[in-house]
Image (cartoon, coloured by chain):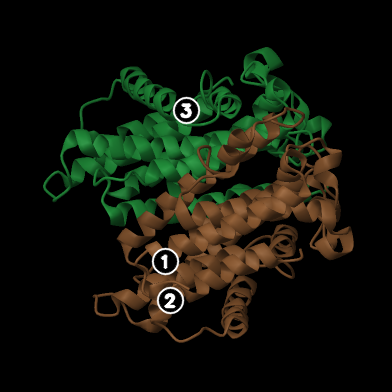
Chain colours: A green, B brown
């Protein structure tokens, strides 16, 4: 329990998640594929809707609320309008994630046929449509961040596009995937593996790393039905993972260590209300799929 | 010759193109792949540098200069700064074009092995790296538009991202490619074919359409060495083209008609200096590759 968190009453985590998830799902359902030619729109919606833990948009909304509570006396726009701005940012991050999964699953990358318990996009719609759907989802992420109105101030729109472009591009996500690609079959040290997944510091780094460690653990201990994707793929592909490097038990201990690190980072953050961020960190490490 | 154009001395088209091309090449060489992991950066640079007519960035710069001449008394920033802003916009458009070519050439799309006289990106670097390079180039286009300084005012950054995201996404380029994909082997009327390629009105529409018609003509009349890509591919793939629809002679006449339409649109535009835009229209229709 951090001092910032202690200032606020306990958060009903389930209620918070359900409420925010509902907003995210509703927004994605309304927005994704709108205005696209039929086949492409279907593939885009298939890739984004009906599945997914929505961890990333929940993180965006939790971070937004953590910061917002402290700036209630600032000149920020009123509740409703700002909420749509946060929702757009949250959905944009999810679209980047969704597009990366579509492209990752393709035969030339991981060649995966199952995702969230359903056939992957290229299995369902063909490779060409999957490629285009991924491309269109990336563009749509930036479209969501730049509504043609003052709901999001222009300077914020520009800053959001700047951050998202860098995080998604060759020095961020796509770059990480290229390193991932180059490291298949290559033995890495723990430091190199950590560096491969670590992009940010403190809470974000611990969360991102914990997510990856738990992913590696679940790839070994869970079955495909629970995971909703093919289990045991990493080991079969000779990918460097935390389990192959540390063994199962030490990997599990490492995930707990990272969770503690995330909580500690929130405590040091000075943010007025870190309850949702703390709950999401717990959720990441304790998940079963 | 339009009245706006007549107010300005004749433009040395070759000099204008050479000068502006040099700026575009220099900027792309400096910017593309910077900060990317080695393999990915190589694939990104290979996709963008050493080749390409740079028609799109030249159009952006010509449009910028056409509009700028008339606003010299406005509060726009001074020459040097604004020039980098225009250069960033020009290069961003080229990056979107380059990424679309990388993905289009992949086996699941057009399966082309030759582009600008060189092996296509997936032939040279493998499909996975080509997929990632295309993805990273799209993100980088938005990164170029959002420098973390006031070189481009925030409102302009946001507007540029908005326009580029829409033009590149499911209601723009990616959507057009999905329709293209769905129409292979399908007989279209001329109106449908025109609708498929026409996205904008007046000069932009005439130019875009003329470019496509001339592309279809060159696919039939030019050889692979001149084109720098495999000739005769459209006919072989049973793609609807202007030549298959109208025959070669009527397609050529149509290209001339569109050129006249583009010039007429410039005349009606009220823009103070349309010389570069007029020259680029000529270049599009008279090109040999």
N-terminal-most mark, 2 or 1 = 2
| Mark 1 secondary-structure assignment | helix
Question: Can you tell which quarter of the image residue B189 is in?
Answer: top right
**Residue A60 drawn above or below residue B167:** above
Q: Is residue B125 visible?
A: yes
**Residue at the spot of label 3:** A54
The quarter of the picture where residue B239 lies is top right
The residue sitting at 42% across, 30% down in the picture is: A280
- Given residues A266 and A25, the one toward you in this image is A25
- Nearest the eye: B92 or A267: B92
Dot 2, how many residues are within 10 Å of its Cα: few (below 14), some (14-19), or many (20+)? many
Question: Circle 2 sits in a helix, a strand or a loop, which is it?
Answer: helix
Q: Give the chain letter at badge 3.
A: A
- Residue A189 in sight in this render: no
Residue A88: percent from the left, percent from the top? 36, 37
Q: CA distance from mark 2 to mark 3?
A: 55 Å
Q: Which residue is mark 1?
A: B267
The residue tagged 2 is: B5
Do marks 2 and 3 both belong to one polypeptide chain?
A: no
Q: Residues within 10 Å of mark 1 (few under 14, many from 20)?
A: many
The numbered mark 2 sits on a residue in which chain?
A: B
Residue B50: mark in rendering = none
- Residue at point 34% right, 67% down? B270
A32 on left or right of B29: left
């Amino acid at each position: 329990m951090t001092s910032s968190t202690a200032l606020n009453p306990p958060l009903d985590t389930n209620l918070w998640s359900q409420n925010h998830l509902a907003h995210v799902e509703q927004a994605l359902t309304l927005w994704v594929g709108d205005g696209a030619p039929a086949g492409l729109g279907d593939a885009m919606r298939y890739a984004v809707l009906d599945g997914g833990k929505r961890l990333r948009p929940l993180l965006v909304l939790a971070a937004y609320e953590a910061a917002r509570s402290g700036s209630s006396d600032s000149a920020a726009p009123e509740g409703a309008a700002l909420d749509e701005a946060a929702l757009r940012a949250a959905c944009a991050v999810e679209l980047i994630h969704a597009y990366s999964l579509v492209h990752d699953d393709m035969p030339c990358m991981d060649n995966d046929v199952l995702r969230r318990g359903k056939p992957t996009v290229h299995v369902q719609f063909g490779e060409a449509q999957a490629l285009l759907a991924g491309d269109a989802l990336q563009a749509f992420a930036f479209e969501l961040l730049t509504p043609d109105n003052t709901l999001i101030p222009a300077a914020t729109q520009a800053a959001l596009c700047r951050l998202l472009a860098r995080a998604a591009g060759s020095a961020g996500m796509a770059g990480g995937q290229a390193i991932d690609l180059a490291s298949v079959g290559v033995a890495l040290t723990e430091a190199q593996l950590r560096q491969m997944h670590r992009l940010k510091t403190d809470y974000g780094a611990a969360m991102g790393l914990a997510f990856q460690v738990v992913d590696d653990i679940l790839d070994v201990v869970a079955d495909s039905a629970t995971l909703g994707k093919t289990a045991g793929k990493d080991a079969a592909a000779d990918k460097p993972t935390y389990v192959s490097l540390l063994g199962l038990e030490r990997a599990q201990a490492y995930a707990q260590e990272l969770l503690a690190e995330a909580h500690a980072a929130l405590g040091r953050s000075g943010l007025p209300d870190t309850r949702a961020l703390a709950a999401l960190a717990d959720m990441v490490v304790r998940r079963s799929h």
